[in-house]
Image: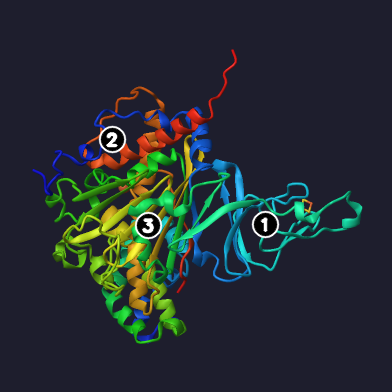
Amino acid sequence: MPLPAEFADLEPYLAWALPTESERYARRLDSSLVEMQTFYDAAFPRLEEAIVYCDEHPYDDLPEDARTLLRLMQSLVMVSFPVEVWKQARVPDSGAAYLTVTAEPVV
Amino acid sequence: MALYPKPAEGSWTEHFPGVGTGVLSYEDCISPEFYEAEREAIFKRAWLNVGRVEDVPRVGSYFTKEIEVAATSLVVVRDLTGQVRAFHNICRHRGNKLMWNDYPRAETAGSCRAFTCKYHGWRYDLTGKLTFVQQEGEFFDLDKADYGLVPVHCEVWAGFIFINLAESPEPLQVFLGAMVTDLGGYPFDALTERYDFTADIRCNWKIFLDAFQEYYHVPVLHSQEATPAARPKMPGFEAPYYNLDGPHRMVATSGPPRRLWPTDYQYPIEIATRSGLFGPWNEPDLGDDLPGVNPGGIKAWQMSNFQIFPNMEILIWQTGWYMLYRYWPTSHNTHRFEGSLFFPPARTASDRAAQECAVVMFKEFALQDAGMLVGTQQGLESRAVRDDFPLNDQELLVRHFHNSVASWVDDYQRAHPVSVTR
Ligand code: FES
Ligand SMILES: [Fe+2]
């Protein structure tokens, strides 16, 4: 089971379970607003529950399914502004600007 | 209607002698000649932050730093005694770049017992001493003691590693001055969970830096920092406190923590992750005594933004985290931006989710600045308007910064007059 059984309904969105910010951001740019909205609508109502679930395990020793769930929720944060605010994948008026993450604590 | 009282002089700008209230020139951001002057007068004379002590955690840990504006590369290392040292990253045999991997122009980091040149294998110890020459007997009267790595002044303050390319610079702490060094007791060393960003941006370094030292633009360019319900309540920005010290400057803001704002003043993702642009809501206990962070002693202190001359910013949040920005010129109209966010190490998944929200929101809004300021550079380069840019009281730090840059360049040029032959 890639995700904990309680979260099996999120399995259609497993492609969003990505370890690094660069991968999550790239997927955001490659997604339509409809795709992000669909993912958001499915995952957002489960976010608090997912965090509670992951918090039950030691953070430095997360079981694989909990790790996948947490990565999925990192992508949910990544699409939240496109869905909640911008209504598009890119930040409006940001032109060709980019801001690359070169180091981050990978879950 | 002023939200906060102004100093007795009537404004923050007039409170500080010599700052002036006249219009500003932006020629210093578009002139290739001025850029050449800045390279010598500022970047080869001022202390520059190149990293944190956590970047060289153990004996033999090193990293390289490209400093295009000074046309050099440095290697910073922790030696056997634990001292942090810096050298020009250049082999003394025939000038090859010493430490690099795969791409000579790319920065690298690692750990070693000695520096070995990839070209002919000359070797240097961690204090820069030349210890091995391949086929030494083939050379002519070569004394290895004469061919150590070229050292660069390197000092550490509060865990921040600074270098100085001048021959005999003033001590780092003297350069930083009291306003900055008062921060020395802040527990920077407890905030080690770190997210690094970098971007190459097509505008002068000072144009980008300006946008991070005034908040007059925030309610406009970043109007979406406030939710639709909150937006009408945020007509403009005023800071309760500004301070200047030598070429350095700071601004503080006040306001209730975002976690106490009404629900409709927050985005759903902020409530769900208990975090947002102002950082995670669960504040770490960093102790009661945080010297220097709120020098104005303002009520409901929210954050302080310290602009350390020339190109470093430390922004400390009341909620227990900080940001470090550096702006590295790469030409008169381009620069490389480095931004890092530092939190206490995450102990739970919810800590990590909260950090994620703060980090993602930082990027959303920084991209607005990064997109727009390319247009500022272009506008200025048209020279349709010259030397006639009016600044208001909330743009005091912008004014002081450009004044400081000009005075460093003037001082240098007075001391090193260029003889012009016609
Ligand atoms: S250039 Fe380094 S050993 Fe020859
Ligand atoms: Fe901004």
Image x and y of residue A21, in percent = 44, 63
The reply to whether residue B11 is in sight is yes
Q: Amino acid at mark 3?
A: Thr
Give the vertical position of A52 relative to B37 (above or below). Answer: below
Tell me which corner region of the image, top left, top right, bottom left or bottom right, holds residue A81: bottom left
In this rendering, position of residue A65 left or right of residue B128: left
Asked if ligand 2 lies within 8 A of label 2, the reply is no
Residues at circles 2 and 3 in contact by the CB criterion of under 8 Å: no
Tag of residue B99:
1
Image x and y of residue B318, in percent = 26, 64
Residue in the image at 26% along x and 28% along y: B22
Residue in the image at 66% along x and 63% along y: B126
Label 2 chain ID: B
The alpha-carbon separation of the residues under discs 1 and 2 comes to 44 Å
Residues beneath discs 2 and 3 located on the same chain: yes
- First of labels 2, 3 by sequence position: 2
Label 1 chain ID: B
Q: Nearer the viewer, residue B164 or B264?
A: B164
Q: Residues within 10 Å of mark 2 (few under 14, many from 20)?
A: some
Find numbered disc 3 in the image and state the secondary structure of the residue it sits on.
helix
Task: Give the residue at mark 2.
Answer: B19
